[in-house]
Amino acid sequence: MISTRIRPYLSNEAFWKRLVLSFITLALIYFWYSAMMLHDVYDSPFQYKGADISYWVMHWLRIPQVVLHNEVTATIFDLGIILSFITAIALIDKRGFTILAGLLLLLYQLLFNYKIGYHTHHLFGFQFALLPFYFRKKDFNLAVRFAGILSCLSYAFSGFSKLYHKAWMVYHSFSDILQNQHAAYFYFRPETMRSKFCLWLIQHPGLGYTFFICAMILQMSFIIGLFTTRFNKALAIFIVCFHLMDWWLMNLGIFMCMTVMVWLFLYRPKATEE
């Protein structure tokens, strides 16, 4: 049972918006601390464009030449994106400020990938979480459901891809993945608990295979979210569990950026409570 004190917040649109925007703001400040902002990579020699038309359009518009002209321009952009989210929190009813913050966040992701030389997906959770904020108030609840469906599709397709490509048939696959993923970490930090645990998993491929199968099933279970919201709380827990496991076993630092999508499964529109 949900506490009567908590229940009103679960259907409070402004509360969820401020919570999500505050979460992203803190994440961006952490990225600054972790040297993951544009002023940290502005002078990289890479100009990644890949096959995504978004990168080519950005390149043709010469946006990288302007934003990444030097450390000063990159720093101004980094400060601007953080300030845009702070402004959006303060003026939560002004949808334009949130749209601006979201566009700057998307541009940051494109520019960051552009300069590090390969495609990263560490901000996709933020994009899914922000999607409902761009719609008018009367369409907000529907947009939350739509964003939740997109999130479920991303997890479900990932799980079914593993199933279709028969990754589950390779008994030692996860042990081999761990060995490659943590090669440098094992060398520089052999005394840590994570190193010891992952080395133990490598030596016991059966247990590693079990973790892999559990992760695949966990991802495929999101197919349920396409048809009903009855199990949304369970799916929210699944997101946290999956990315905790992903962080602990694979050392993928996307826990903060992906678990923010949990709000899409915990928000309870007033219309559904009546």
Image (cartoon, grey):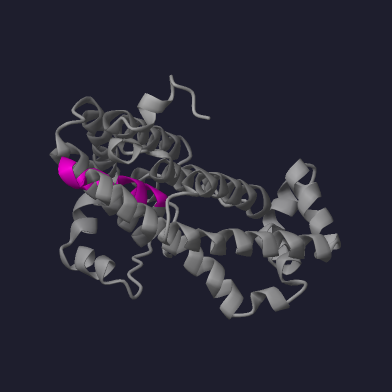
Residue range in magenta is 125-139
Q: Where is 102 relative to 29, above or below?
A: below
Point 69% across, 65% down: residue:
213
Q: Is residue 134 magenta?
A: yes
Residue 124: percent from the left, percent from the top? 39, 54
Q: Is residue 131 visible?
A: no
Camera-side residue: 164 or 76?
164
Viewer-closest of 13 and 67: 13
Percent of width and height locating residue 245: 64, 50
Q: Main secondary structure of the magenta part?
A: helix
Q: Is residue 138 left or right of residue 203?
A: left
Depth check: give the residue in front, 148 or 186: 148
- Residue plotted at (80% across, 57% down): 201
Quadrant the C terminus occupies: top left
Q: Position of residue 257 (x, y in %)?
A: 45, 46
Q: Position of residue 132 (x, y in %)?
A: 27, 47
Residue at the image position 43 percent from the left and 19 percent from the top: 5
